[in-house]
Image (cartoon, rainbow, N blue to C red):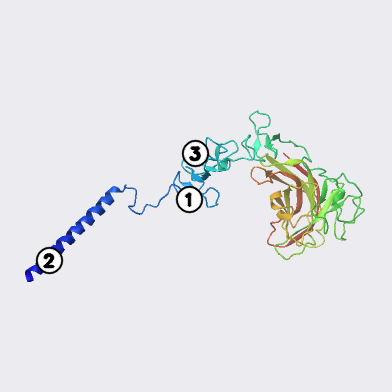
Amino acid sequence: MKTRYKNMYKLIKQRNLTLIKLLFVGFFIMLTACSKDDVCGYDESFDCEGLQLDFGDACDSNGDGIYDGTVTEYCQCNSAGAGFDCEDLQLNIGNACDANGDGMLNGIVNDSCECLEETELFDCEDLQLNFGDACDSNNDGIDDGFVSDSCECVQNLVLNTCPGFIQNGDFESVTGNPNAQVDQDINLANFWKALWSSASLADLFDDNTTNYGSSCFVGPTPQSGVFAGMWIENSTNPNRDSTYREGMFNELTASINQNTGIYNLTFDYSNMSGTCASTNDVKVGVYGVYHPNSNPLPTSPTGLSMPSNIDLFGAANTVFLGEVTISASTTNIWENASFSIDTGVLTFPVNGINHIMITNSHQPFNHYGKMYLGFDNFCLTN
């Protein structure tokens, strides 16, 4: 009996060893059958990871649950049997594509069936340029123009004598008596208007008056004919009201566009309130604005900085051109301010600017300041 159990144990042990050998051989064959790039039995990579499909696989081209398309080499599910806008590319206009052959979908098929990098898409495909870009208007190799919104290369207008692009820069052309009304009458000067339809507006005077609306105001000297006047108030207080927020708006001779060169702005200013009370320095801001004349002016502001000057006509229609500091020591004697405007550095509205806005700067000093200033002889040249 003891011998029989011993023989049975040996038989079971031999069978188990044989089974283990068979399993080991099978597993080894399975491993050697896998390529070096695969993880055997767990390869779930796809040509198109986003679709979880391979090139040529059936796919649902329109999300209706029906597999009516085929996965292209660009990992797009195109409807089976449907034609393409661009047969050579086997793609449609607007499809993503490989612009430089690096296997990355870094381009878009344009309406000429070209696969262009997204950074190479232009407002004006024929010119390969965008609106406002500098261009050669007469094919002489010199970029002397700008691309208009109708994709034409328009030659820059050159105005190098004052008042240049400013119309009626000296305020001498008027439609009425500047002294008939003490204030709020800037619109009497041709091509000038207020920044908003009502509330506190800029004023117009000439040398025949001494009534400037306040007994302590003093007229500018030397006399210069017709001139404008307005309050310039600077404050970082967000609750400051709009009582002394004033400004004016000039229609330019011609629009000025991005990348059309360097322009120079000059104007005269005088502190007419210097004898009224002491004050800190203030800053005058100058802005370029695109504003069709048929559009209404903005509504009256609710505060000294609400809305911001940038937002009065919309941020997309406004560019901050620069600012001028008026010192606390400034008197009523005319002084001259000037600065350059580089259209290649600033971001202009797509349609360029056709107005200049003069008001307080939206970047005030930390200290409070307020002056009533006279303005004259605006000039903008290139």
For the residue marked with disc 1, what is the amino acid? Leu
Across and down, in percent, residue 198 comes to 83, 57
Viewer-proximal residue among 177 and 113? 113
Asked if disc 3 and disc 1 are in contact, CB closer than 8 Å, the reply is no
User: Helix, strand or loop at disc 1?
Assistant: loop
Q: How many marks?
A: 3
3 or 1: tag closer to the N-terminus: 1
Q: Is residue 55 left or right of residue 309?
A: left
Mark 1 sits on what residue?
51
Mark closer to the chain start, 3 or 2: 2
Quarter where residue 133 is shown: top right
Q: Secondary structure at mark 3?
A: loop
Q: Position of residue 306 (x, y in %)?
A: 73, 60
- Please say if the residues under marks 2 and 1 sit with CB atoms less than 8 Å apart: no
Give percent across and percent down for residue 82: 55, 40
- Residue that badge 3 annotates: 100
Horizontal relation, residue 237 to residue 215: left or right: left
Q: Are marks 3 and 2 in contact (CB under 8 Å)?
A: no
